[in-house]
Amino acid sequence: MKKIMKKAIVKVAAKVCSSMATSVSASACLWGAYQPKEPKSLRK
């Protein structure tokens, strides 16, 4: 029973963390907080 609960908790935590990371990274680009520099090869 403990193993089943532990696996379920780990799965839920992984899904929550990955969805939070995705939403944070997408919103940073959306609002202009993160603007990477353009590589020299693409500037031409």
Image (cartoon, rainbow, N blue to C red):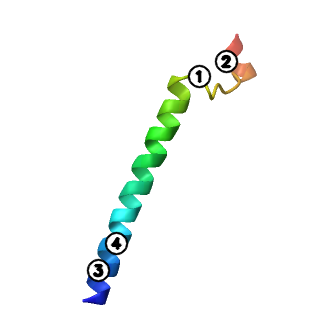
Mark 1 is on which residue type?
Answer: Gly
Residue under pointer 2: 42
Which quarter shows the N terminus? bottom left
- Label 1 element class: loop
| Residue drawn at (70%, 13%) of the image | 43
Residue 39: x and y in percent read 71, 24
Q: Are marks 2 and 1 in contact (CB under 8 Å)?
A: no
The image quarter containing residue 37 is top right
- Going from N to C along the chain, the mark reached first, 2 or 1, is 1
- Label 3 element class: helix
Q: Estimate the spatial distance between the alpha carbons at disc 4 and disc 3, rounded to whole Å.
A: 6 Å
Q: Which numbered disc covers residue 5?
A: 3
Q: Is residue 7 above or below residue 19?
A: below
Q: Estimate the spatial distance between the alpha carbons at disc 4 and disc 2, rounded to whole Å.
A: 45 Å
Mark 4 is on which residue type?
Answer: Ile
Q: Estimate the spatial distance between the alpha carbons at disc 3 and disc 1, rounded to whole Å.
A: 41 Å
- Going from N to C along the chain, the mark reached first, 4 or 2, is 4
Q: Which numbered disc covers residue 32?
A: 1
